[in-house]
Every structure is written in C-alpha cells, then in structure tokens.
Amino acid sequence: MRADSEMVRYIVNIYAASLERLRDLQRIYDLDIFRGTARQIDSNFTVEALVSAEEIARLRNEGYGVEILKNAEELMRKHRNEAK
C-alpha cells in the first residue's frame, strides 16, 4: 500500500442535499475543500475538493454524490512538463 503522501488524489465535485451536509465535509470528514467553489444548484449544494479514491468511496457510501473532474497527479505532471 502506498503512503498517504503518495496516494493519488482527484479533483472532484461533491454534491450534498443540504448546506449542513456540505459543511460536514470539512467539519466531520476534514477534506481539502476549495471553498470558493461552493454553490447551490437547484435543491443541491456542491463544492470542489481534492480527495483520494478511499475518500470518494466513503463519501458515496455516506450518500454524497461525487463527480471526478481530474486526476490531480496527472495535472501536476502536465504542468511540470510545460514548465520545462
């Protein structure tokens, strides 16, 4: 198993049924939330976050919707190659 610092992370949209559930993402789950991305869409609330595959599975099991946007590791690698 890889060490936590080496774990692949994903940039995701997390969907919650209430604002309180959205707030729980940081209070209870202690996730890396991109606060400036929080918004309400119809009756749902959403925010972007940086999470591991294990965190995605846990959130889905807890009733959150999770949409994977990007593999953060691949994105960092791409930016490093462009900077060379």
Image (spheres, helix red, strand yellow):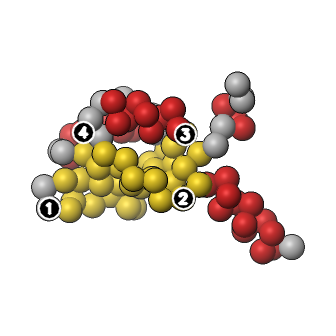
The residue at the point 37 percent across, 35 percent down is 59
* Element type where label 4 sits in the image: helix
In this rendering, would 40 be left or right of 73? left
Check the image and report above or below for 4 versus 43.
above
Q: Find disc 4 in the rendering and name its residue.
A: 21
Q: Nearer the viewer, mark 3 or mark 4?
A: 3
Check the image and report above or below for 41 versus 58.
below
Amino acid type of the residue tagged 1 in the rendering:
Asp
In terms of sequence position, does the residue under pointer 4 or pointer 2 come before the other? 4
Q: Nearer the viewer, mark 1 or mark 4?
A: 1
Position of residue 77 measured from the top left corner of the image (x, y, whole percent): 74, 60
The residue at the point 35 percent across, 36 percent down is 60
* Element type where label 2 sits in the image: strand
Marks 3/4 in contact by CB < 8 Å: the verdict is no
Q: In which quadrant of the rendered view does residue 58 lie?
A: top left
Position of residue 34 measured from the top left corner of the image (x, y, whole percent): 45, 55
Marks 3/2 in contact by CB < 8 Å: the verdict is no
Position of residue 8 measured from the top left corner of the image (x, y, whole percent): 64, 43
Amino acid type of the residue tagged 3 in the rendering:
Ser
Residue nearest the observer in this picture, 7 or 22: 7
Residue count near mark 3 (Cα–Cα under 10 Å), binned few <14, some 14–19, many ≥20: some
Q: Distance between the residues labelled 1 and 4?
A: 16 Å
Q: Which residue ends up furthest to the right in the rendered image?
A: 84
Q: Distance between the residues labelled 4 and 2?
A: 23 Å
Give me the disc on residue 52: 3
Amino acid type of the residue tagged 4 in the rendering:
Arg
Give me the disc on residue 42: 1
Give me the disc on residue 70: 2
Q: How far apart are marks 1 and 2 (CA)?
A: 24 Å
In terms of sequence position, does the residue under pointer 3 or pointer 2 come before the other? 3
